[in-house]
Each structure stands twice: as C-alpha cells, then as structure tokens.
Image (tube, coloured by chain):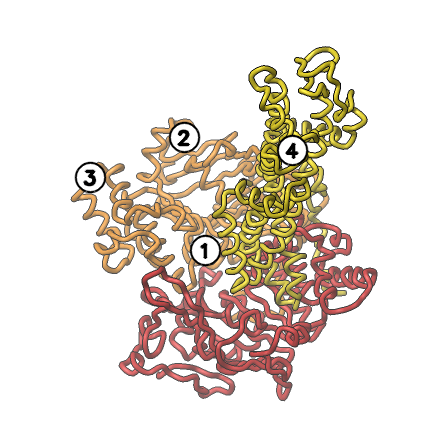
Chain colours: A yellow, B orange, C red
Amino acid sequence: MEVVKEIGHNVVVPTEKKSRAREFWKKWKKQKTAFWAGFFILFLFVIALFGPWIAPYDPYEPNYDVTLQTPSIEHWAGTDEYGRDILSRIIVGTGISLGVSFSSVLVGAVVGTILGLISGYYGGWMDRLIMRWSDVMFAFPDLLLAIAIVAILGPGLTNVVVAVAVFSIPSFARLIRGNTLAAKEAVFVEAARSMGAKSSRIMFRHIFPETVSSMIVFFSMRIGTSILAASSLSFLGLGAAPESPDWGAMLSMGRDYLATSPHVVIIPGIAIFLTVLAFNLVGDGLRDILDPKTKN
Amino acid sequence: MSENIMEVKHLQTQFTRDNQKTVVLDHVSFHIKKGEVLGLVGESGCGKSVTSLSIMRLFKDTTGEITNGEIVYNGTNLLSISESDMRRIRGKEISMIFQEPMTSLNPVMKIGEQLMEAIRLHLGYSDQKAREQAVSMLTKVGIPRPSEIMGEYPHQLSGGMRQRIMIAMAMSCNPNLLIADEPTTALDVTIQAQILDVMKQLQAEEHMSMLLITHDLGVVAEMCNRVVVMYAGRVVEEASVYDLFDEPKHPYTKGLIGSVPKIGQKRARLDSVPGNVPTPNNMPKGCKFAPRCKDVMPVCWEKEPVITTVGKERFCRCWLYQGEGRDVHV
Amino acid sequence: MFMSKSLVVVDGIKKTFPIDSGLLSSKKSVKAVNHVSFEIKEGETFSLVGESGCGKSTTGRLVTRLLMPDEGKIWINGEEISKMKETKLREVRKQVQMVFQDPYASLNPRMKIRDVVAEPLLIHTKLSAQERDRIVAEMLEVVGLSSYHAEKFAHEFSGGQRQRIGIARALILKPKLIVADEPVSALDVSIQSQILNLLKDLQEEFHLTYLFISHDLSVVEHISDKIGVMYLGSLVESGPKETIFANPRHPYTKALLSSVPIPDPRAKRERIILQGDVPSPVNPPLGCLFHTRCPFAMDICKTTPPALREAADRDHFVACHL
C-alpha cells in the first residue's frame, strides 16, 4: 500500500516491553513494611493449609495432666484449661480465621462489585435504590448488624460468613460505584459506545478493569476487619463452637483464667493482632502502588 | 555586549528520576537583543519550556538541575547569584506568562490583591499607589471595568480575560524581559488575536524584550523578529524571521514549515516529517534528527554536528552546512 | 460530486443540557446545539468549525447518536436515527465510526492494541480469532503501523501512532462515515501533517465520507470540501470550502478567518479583532447571537435572529441580516 511506504514509521522503537507483573514486583519490593507483612501473610497461608500436619499436638484432645501450663519446652505456648496445646490450636485456628474472613470478604466483594457497577453505570432509580439501601446498612454499627444476622440465622461459622459478607457489601458497592462513575466518563468508554458495544461489554470489559486495583486494596484492608468481626462473634458465642480452635472462641474460653493464666488469652490475642495488622499494612502498601490517586 | 539583554551559553539541564539522569537540554545557546521579540519554536518535548524554566531557575522540585552553561542577564550570570537575588530579579526585571493562566493565579485571592502584591513587593509602592498602578495596567491590557475586576476572583473570568490579567501582572513592574510560554495556546483563535494584539502593542510601547515560546509558526511569523528552532533539547537553527520562512536551512525547519497547512495555499498533500520525536532515553547517537531526516548522510549517524554560521546572523546545526562557515560553538 | 447522494442529512437538530446550579437557584440549561441543519454527500468531507463551546463536538456526538437530539431529525444512509432504539442503532453504527481528539484517552490502556483494534469486529461480526488477527494486522499496515505493534499496549506509542491506532479501529468495519472530532489538535505539527495526509489517502482508498470537527481553520481548509461555521450552538454560515474562504459573508466567519495567524512574516492583511468574549450559552443574547461582538450590528440584529438563507453563490448559506 502506498500509504505505508511514505511513512517511515518504525524509527522509534517503543520503550522496552515491561511486563506488568515485573513492574509491580519492582515497586512492591520498595514498600518495605508491606513487603514483610505480605511475607507474614504468605506464611500464615502455609500454616492454614498444612496446619493439621504441622501442629505438634492434637488441638481437640484434652490432657488433664497438663492443664493451664505456662509456656515450656513441651508446650511452646502453654496449655489451656483442658490441657490442650495452645500453639497447636492457634495453628489449626489460622485456617478457620483466614477461611472465614476470606470467604466472607469474597462474597461481599463479588456482590458489592456487581451492585456498584450497576448502580454507577445505569444510574437513575437503580442507583438510588442501591445507594439508599447502602445508607441504611451503613447506619447500623457493623458488629451490631452482624450480631442481628447471626441471631436470625443461628450461630455457626457459615452464618458468620454470611453476616460479615452482608456488612461488607455496601462498602464495596460504594467504592465500585464511585470508580464506575469516573470510568464511565473515559473517552475510551465513549469510543466503545460509538462502536455499538453492548452495556454488558462496556461494563465488564472497559469499566470493571478500571475498578480492580482499588478493589484489591480495599479487599486486603477489609480482611483485617472481617477477622476482627468473626473473632468478636465467636467471642460472643455466636460463631465457632466453643471447643473449636477458633481464635475468637479461644479468647472467649480463656477469659475466665485471665487473672491466673493470662497466656491463654494473650496468645490468641496476639495472633489476631498480628494478622489484622499484617493485612492492613499490605493494604496500605498496595494502595500506594495501585491507587491512581496516590500515583505521581 | 550591551545590545543583548540576555545571553544563554551552552546551557545543559538534566532531570533525575528514579536515579536515572536524563539530559533534556544540551548546548543550548542563543541571545536576546534589547527590544526584540525572540521566538523559541519547537514541538512538544523539544526543551523549549525547560529552557524558560532554566532561565528563571524555576524548577518546582529538585529533579531539574542545570549542569552546565551560563545565563548572562545584563552582565550577571544568573546561575551564580543567590536565590534571594534571583527572587528580586524574578517578577521585577524578568517576568513570565504561562500557558494556563488559571494555574498561575491564586484561585482564592481577588485579582486586585494579586496584582497589588507583586507591585508592592517589587516596587515598594504604598497601597494607594499600587492600586493606581494595578488599575492602569488592567486598562492597558484592555480589560473593561478595571476597578470592578479588581474585586473579582479568577474563576469569574474567561480564559482570555485571565490571560490579560496575567499579562498585566507580568508587566506591572515594567520588566526588562518578558518570557511568554505558549501564552495563547489554550485560547480560541479570536481571543488569541486579541491577546497577541495586546502583547505586540505593549511590547512596542515599553520597548521591552520578549522571549516568546510557541509551537505555532503562525504566531512566530506574526510576533517575532528572530527565531530559534529547537529539536530534541538542541538549538538546530537560529535566524531572522524573514530568513527562516524565506529560506529555512535545517531539514527539520523545512519539514516543520512544510507540514503546516496555510490558508489560501492549495496543496493536495502536506509535507510531513516522518517518524516521531525521539524520547530523551532513546536518543540517537549522532544528529538527533537523523532518523527523521530526508537528507541524512552516513556522518549524521556517527557524530552530532556543531552549530555553524550559515549566513548573516544565521546559524544552523546540520552536517549539510558544516565547513561552509565558521564553527560558532560546540 | 454532482448528483451523488447524501449520506448524512441533519435537519434542525437541537440539544439542551440541564445544568445544576446549586440548591436554591432555578434550573438552568445550556442550548448546546440549536437548530442545526446540513447535508454531507457520499465521499465528501464536511467540516464543522468554530471556537470552544460552539457546539461542534456536540453536533458530532448527535450524528453518531452518542447523544440523543431533543428535536430534529438525522438520516444516515437513508435511515432516520434521531429516535432509534439502541438495539437497532447497533446496525447503523457499523457504518459510522468515530475518531477522537485525545489519542491518549480514547484507547483503553489495559488492552493490547490487537484487542483495541479488533473490538468493533468482536462486537459486530462472528469472525474467528485468527481471522480477526489477520484483519487487524492488515489494518495496522494500512494506517502505517506494523503488525508486530498488535502485541503492545497503548502507552508504548507516541501520540501520532496512537491516533493511527484509533483510525485503524475506526476503519476496521469498513464504515461509510467517519466522524473525526479534532483528530489532530492534540498532535505536534509535524505529526499532524502525517495524520492529515493519512486521512486523505484513506478517504480515497476506501471511499470514506468525513464529518470533520476542528477549531483550526488552516487544517479545515486543507481537508474539507464543505464547511459549516458554528457560533454559540448555531450554524452561521455554510458552503463549499472555496466560497467560504474566498468570499465569507458572515462577519463572524470573516473575523475568524482574519484571526488565524499566517505562517508567513510577509503576509499583509487586515485583521478584524473582535471585542469581548463569546457570551455564555446559559444566557445567550437575544436576536442574532453574534450581535454583541459584531462590528456591523444593526438594530434588527438585537431583536430578530436571522435565518440561514442561501446567498448569491450556489450552496452557500449565511445567517445574517446584512
């Protein structure tokens, strides 16, 4: 074609191709705190997966010879009032805590994202409906809402997942709606419309990817919150069964021995604290990298 | 010496980002004569705005740094004086107008306050006298109802009005040199005509020197006495405005002039400069224009040409003219 | 050009945007486009020219039905689309594609160029992935890029190259009409001329019709066959390029033409410098919209808006009492 000949176009070699993953990794390594927090979370996941095989003792088997022992060589984190090894219980409990919080936030994120996309993209009465419903949900204190839901559905881990998910939905919906409103104005979205693309294509192919990075950030922060909420519910006896090695349940069981054997409470407390902190730090780090608003 | 208000010699400026140093200006030399309008032309990324920031020493952060050269203003090298001396020169002796007036005006201060602040600061006038000076400046730049406008905020005015305010502000202390960085690029063409008209008139009245930075060859032809053409951080050609348009020397200048559609001139096709401007990290080794040049020779890929005299007060950085004249500067 | 049929007919379209102006003030609106009519013949380039806020871009978006007109009718290739439903409109959109001003914003930064350019095919055809890739590669060559560019992302390209990608995307369905909204105004002059030449070549090769929207009169003169001059949402003058440039009738067109800086220091001419700014479209003046700045304003101009009437020359329409 004649058009081509005339334009000596290949003179500029575009900048070397950097894979996005590599670029992300480069930036991630610079986020020192978040980097180590992420490492810790990875470590928690390994424990969560292999917990039952790593745990030195059976977390459920009582041993009345060694009740309420302080940390020692045999029991690194001591034992509880039934003589169960606290370290083993913490290890096995990691799986419960992470499982509950992940699945609840995941459910919240999926539902919230869909609602947020619909709300932001279509606007009008759907937007008003979804946003007013969110306002109502925001008006309840998170925990109270969760308690109410569990009270209706009955105690148990599945219902804790549902409860925590329900109070995560409106926050995700809000966040994604805001991002959708901004992305909707992008020229490339208008370009897609001018091509005749259907709404579903515009929403999922063009707008949704624009919201992903802030969703990931929020997701990781939200995990911390939901671990706390799930533990609180268990602590109140509304979540995991009292004998299960759930961190919240352990706190609840141990509180009678707070004065005499504080380690029974302190150790699960530390586990919760470190995990929540790690997720929040990772969230902060991710935000610094991914959030377009903090980009310079 | 005395006929030049400013001489920029071998200016080299670099930016540091992520520990990577990028030289954005190299061997930039030119002079501005007293009372003339010098045009600095080039496309985006050619370094024309960095040149003006270098002259004003106005790098917002520490990433920009002048690494070589001199900027001699009325006999003093601006690069060797203290920041506080520089501050006295800025705004009083050398003023600047930017492309986007909204960003250079304080949105929460009234127009009058902003104008008077500069006048009080640099000329040491009393409130009363500063106000008079401000109103007379606003009248000069053609603002209707000047005393009312004094009490308004920037967002209440149109783009053209704001640019007039900026000009009034820049001219309020009777500067010796006005640097205008794309002063009309953000404006509509009928408003641009108004602003250029005001600038031309004031420049002639005050016999002020002006450095006009623009990408628009039409504006250059209309406003300037002499022109400096920049490409990829270098000066590639310097000539009087007539010489430049009558007989451009550098292949880039030729391409640039040929690629602008001109009203009343019927051409089926425009000339075009093929390819794209090289990015600072991707500079060709020899002449920076070699990859896009239609007269490219083997030597162009090897060595960068120096600037040479190619006529009366004409300079060009191109191997086509090396040996024709005397090397002026490296 | 004679007797070729009209691809686009726009008849008296209007578009008003409501503006929110705080809680207490009454609802206001902007008449962005007010009773605009024109025709574009097949294979022709019709340019809308005017200053910012004159409604030229809105008109372009009405013709592509990215916006729905409040009043008036638009025919594309004989079909009336002004009130057409989205589902039916999709068929029309195969024939009408857009090129946008900002080559940085109009390409999805998260998609590979292959997917960007192939998107219209994905929407409108059932071609296999290989077939799509083949057509994309072909199209990239046509606009002066190479097929290996398909694997890259938009940010790896310069502005001019991105605009070529945008053009490739617009061409891939072999449309009849391209609406180009300021396609070169974000580009440097040396790149701008590349794109203008490309648009001209493509028009010849694919027998395209252009609705070209621009504020730059020299660009418009170079590329157009016919020109419509807009001011404050209205068409004030329209006609063949030669007539408009050689014999402008409307004072606004005259002033606009005389305001363009000519890249020739020896050019001598009389410049008409308009006083004041364009009035706010929220509160447009009564009568002729231009009378507040018009050097020839008469009494009638302050009260009665002039209609677009045919002037002495053929096909030349002017809305002025003079």
For badge 4, the amino acid type reads: Trp
Q: Residue at x 40, y 65 (%)?
A: B190
Q: Disc 4, disc 3: CB below 8 Å?
A: no
Q: Position of residue C40 (x, y in %)?
A: 58, 80
- The residue under label 1 is B185
A80 left or right of A120 in image: right
- The residue under label 4 is A28
Of pointers 3 and 2, the one earlier in the residue sequence: 2
Q: Could you say whether the residue bearing mark 4 is in a helix, strand or loop? A: helix
- The residue under label 3 is B125
Observer-side mark, 4 or 1, equals 4
Measure the C-alpha gap from mark 2 to mark 1.
31 Å
For badge 3, the amino acid type reads: Tyr
Q: Position of residue C121 (x, y in %)?
A: 74, 66
For disc 2, the chain is B
- The residue under label 2 is B77
Q: Position of residue C242 (x, y in %)?
A: 52, 78
